[in-house]
Image (tube, rainbow, N blue to C red):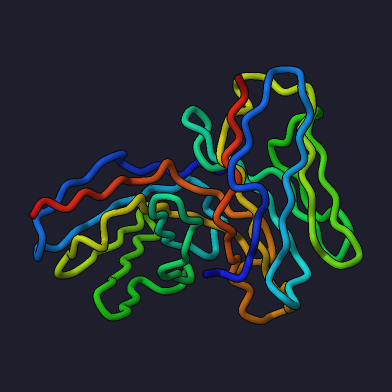
């Protein structure tokens, strides 16, 4: 158990809908990362938040957005869903200590199926 | 740009050594990692190597880095059934402070 929790575990929805994925980082970790794992794109970085602020953006679609709340949990919002958005979405957290050991710990993922 | 490549499948007999290979293109990659993904689980960091090293050993795991050829390998000695998983190599410029760029993953199957 990495200490990172993600809910829900599975989500099945229809095209055009909107969903919210939730991530609770390890206690004390300030940084949260979102990754998408799909069959055609592999495992790719979407976005990073640090202490409530967006830190870096990867290949995140405009239909997707994220935020990190004061209690450091994060949500990834996916809207106008398409079949191709079906994937496993991982959240990771790290302490973000300058010059320190900053391993990214991964949650178990949320499997999204768009029908 | 960043690109990390791995072969997709590897089958190894139980008790033999497994060698999983990875090539990367970003010459500014400073840290290189090996992650393990078991079914239904997240990614678990197995080991990492800093780019100024060429080898790192950790129990059954040996990581070799050829920086000139941008080639990374993970050797698992005495492979067991519990080693069945998908193995990802990844790279970053800073340790844990920024995004990881992952390879395609290698599915390791153990033959009894």
The answer to whether residue B70 shows anywhere in this view is no
Question: Which residue occupies 40% across, 42% down?
Answer: B5
Question: Which residue occupies 59% across, 47% down?
Answer: A9
The image quarter containing residue B76 is: bottom left
Quarter that holds the C terminus of chain B: bottom left
The image quarter containing residue B74 is: bottom left
Question: Which residue occupies 72% across, 76% down?
Answer: A27
* Residue A102 x/y as whole percent: 63, 73
Q: Nearer the viewer, residue B17 or A38?
A: A38
Quarter that holds the N terminus of chain B: top right
Q: Nearer the viewer, residue B40 or B89?
A: B40
Q: Is residue A57 above or below residue B90?
A: above
* Residue B40 x/y as whole percent: 45, 50
Q: Is residue B70 left or right of residue A20?
A: left
Q: Is residue A19 left or right of residue A91?
A: right
Q: Nearer the viewer, residue B90 or A105?
A: A105
Q: Is residue A103 above or below residue B24?
A: below
Question: Which residue occupies 40% across, 60% down?
Answer: B67
Q: Is residue A3 left or right of residue A23?
A: left
Q: Is residue B33 above or below residue B9?
A: below
- In the displayed image of the protein, which residue is found farthest to the right? A70
Number of disc labels: 0
The answer to whether residue A28 shows anywhere in this view is yes
* Residue A21 x/y as whole percent: 73, 45
């Amino acid at each position: 158990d990495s200490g990172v929790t993600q809910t829900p575990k599975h989500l099945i929805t229809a095209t055009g809908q909107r969903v919210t994925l939730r991530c609770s980082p390890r206690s004390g970790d300030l940084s949260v990362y979102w990754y998408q794992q799909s069959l055609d794109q592999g495992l790719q970085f979407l976005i990073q938040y640090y202490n409530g602020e967006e830190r870096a953006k990867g290949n995140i679609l405009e239909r997707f957005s994220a935020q990190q709340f004061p209690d450091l949990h994060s949500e990834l919002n996916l809207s106008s869903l398409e079949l191709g958005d079906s994937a496993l979405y991982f959240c990771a957290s790290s302490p973000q200590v300058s010059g320190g050991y900053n391993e990214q710990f991964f949650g178990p993922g949320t499997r999204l199926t768009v029908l | 740009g960043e690109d990390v490549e791995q072969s997709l499948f590897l089958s190894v007999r139980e008790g033999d050594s497994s060698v999983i290979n990875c090539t990367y293109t970003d010459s500014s990659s400073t840290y290189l990692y090996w992650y393990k993904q078991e079914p239904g689980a997240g990614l678990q960091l197995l080991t990492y190597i800093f780019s100024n090293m060429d080898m790192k050993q950790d129990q059954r795991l040996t990581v070799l880095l050829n920086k000139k050829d941008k080639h990374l390998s993970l050797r698992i000695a005495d492979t067991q059934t519990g080693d069945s998983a998908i193995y990802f190599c990844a790279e970053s410029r800073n340790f844990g402070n920024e995004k990881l760029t992952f390879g395609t993953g290698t599915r390791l199957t153990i033959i009894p």
